[in-house]
Structures are given as structure tokens and as C-alpha cells.
Amino acid sequence: MLNQITPLLLTYNEAPNITRSLGVLNWAQDIVVVDSFSDDNTVELSKSFPHVRVFQRAFDCHRNQWEFGLKETSISTPWVLALDADYVLSDELVAELDQLAPDAQTAGYRANFVYCIKGRKLRSGIYPPVTVLYRREAATYVQDGHTQRVALAGAIEDLRAPIFHDDRKSFKHWFGSQKRYTALEAQKLREADPAQLPFADRLRRWRFIVPPVMLVYCLIVRGGILDGWAGFYYAFQRATAEAMLSHRLHG
């Protein structure tokens, strides 16, 4: 089925990541990169790979960037594999994609993730499953807080093999991203009906409850303490992000 899939990636200053992400997509006959006018060498690195077509669009929101990539870049295959630039496909997942035989009711596939810090796989990662593979004609994007999600007309199946989430950008870059993300997420939580929110999001509406809980959850419940420095670093990141969100909500 690989010849029926076009990988689609969004980028902005992804030079530390893009080579690894594109390097495992050498099976693809067409790869689309939508870049938000990076000021590093992301575009040059992307163009160095065969079969990559690069488009540039000024960023306004994630939903609009994905919609542009999906509908305005002349993707012709029936299936699209939507990837962040810090996603790295496992060999097992590529083999699984090749053997997929979806029925007519299947509109997409959801993947689990193995979170990595500088290449080290964590047992404590809490990155949620994401629908990454979908029928092009059945998909549209909607904004959801700081990010987006794809809405599909049809059933979504689960993939067995994982994707590695391995962002090699600096902590300064991560912190700046979290400032933007938590502002959007706080707006979403303030505007939502509390009765309709998942339990975790209802907890987030309480002042500074979640940050220490997240630290303990990542280190103890999820076993991050066994991941060494990478586990502590990840737990610190997650607790910091929750503290920033709490400050946005109650500051």
C-alpha cells in the first residue's frame, strides 16, 4: 500500500529534526512539506531529499496549515500520512503500512508513540495516540486548542507499530512554543462547558493542582525515574507546561 500514500509534513525551523524524519520516508514517491517560512536551513535540507515538494505559507493557525497541505498542494494519492517534523517512523510501522488492506469503511489509522529525549526512548512518555494516516477525500481539519485534529467520515483503526516522537530542538525553543500553546489551550478551557471536559481538563481548571501531580505521575506512576536523566528532564518539561497553563488560566 506504500505507493498509495503521500507523507505530508509541516515545518518551521526544524533543521534539528527534518533530516531524520525524511530519511525514513525513502519509500514514498511523493512527499509534501509545508514550511512556515523557516529562517534556518529547513527548506534546503528538505529539498535535498528526492521526491520532496516544498511549499511555503505564512502561518496563521495549525488547522489552516494542514488544510492547505491537504487540499492545495496537488496530492494525488488516495491516502495521506500526516507527520510532525519530529516524528520518526519505526521500521515496523513502515512494514505494517505496506501490508495494510483497509476495507471501504476504514477512513483512517491511529498510531501510538514512543517519546524520546535526544534519541533515548522513554517508558514514561504520555504523548497520546494520533490519527496520522487517512483517506484524502474523507478528511478535513478542525482547530482544537493549541493544535488541530483531523475529522474523518468513517471508521478509525489502530496501528500496531509505533512512531518515535524525538524533538531535538533546544529547551529555549520548546519554552517559546509552550508559551504560545498554553495561551491557546487556556482560551479553549475557559470557553468550554466544564461538564463536557474530560477529567484531566477539569483538574486543570483548579489552581496549580496538576503541575505537581504531573511530576509524580511521570516519575513514579509511569516509571520515569527508571529512565535516568531523560526521565527527569521529561517530567520537568511536562510539569513546567502544566504550570504555564495554570498561570494562564488563573494569573
Image (cartoon, helix red, strand yellow):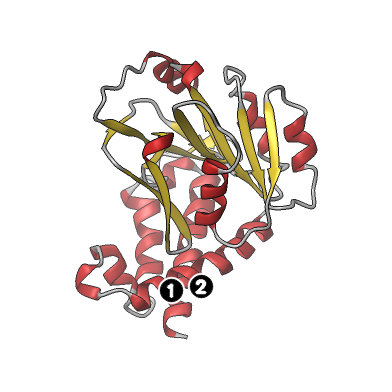
- Residue 188 or residue 58, whichever sits in front: 58
Instruction: Give the image location of residue 184, x and y in percent.
Output: 48, 69
Residue drawn where x is 31% and y is 67% of the image:
201
- The amino acid on which the numbered mark 2 sits, given as a three-letter code, is Ala
Residue lying at 42% horizontally and 79% vertically, measured from the top left = 249
Q: Residue at x 50, y 59 (%)?
A: 236
Q: Position of residue 102 (x, y in %)?
A: 30, 22
Q: Position of residue 119 (x, y in %)?
A: 58, 35
Residue 85 visible: no
Q: Residue at x 63, y 64 (%)?
A: 176
Label drawn at residue 183 = 2
Q: Nearer the viewer, residue 196 or 213?
A: 196
Q: Secondary structure at mark 2?
A: helix
The amino acid on which the numbered mark 1 sits, given as a three-letter code, is: Ala
Question: What residue sits right under mark 1 in the picture?
Answer: 186
Q: Are marks 2 and 1 in contact (CB under 8 Å)?
A: yes
* Residue at the left extreme of this rendering: 195
Q: Nearer the viewer, residue 177 or 116?
A: 177
Extreme-bottom residue of the structure: 251
Q: Is residue 214 visible?
A: yes
Q: Is residue 26 left or right of residue 228?
A: right
Q: Quadrant of residue 144?
A: bottom left
Task: Estimate the x, y position of residue 120 in percent, counting from the top left.
Answer: 55, 36
The quadrant of the rendering that contains the N terminus is top left
Location of residue 84 with respect to 208 vertically, above or below: above
* Front position in the image: 222 or 238: 238
Please tell me whether residue 245 is drawn above or below residue 6 in the rendered image: below
Q: Is residue 53 left or right of residue 117?
A: right
- Category of crowding for the residue at label 2, using alpha-carbon neighbours closer than 10 angstroms: few (below 14), some (14–19), many (at least 20): some
Classify 10 Å Cα crowding around label 1: few (below 14), some (14-19), many (20 and above). Answer: many
Q: Secondary structure at mark 1?
A: helix
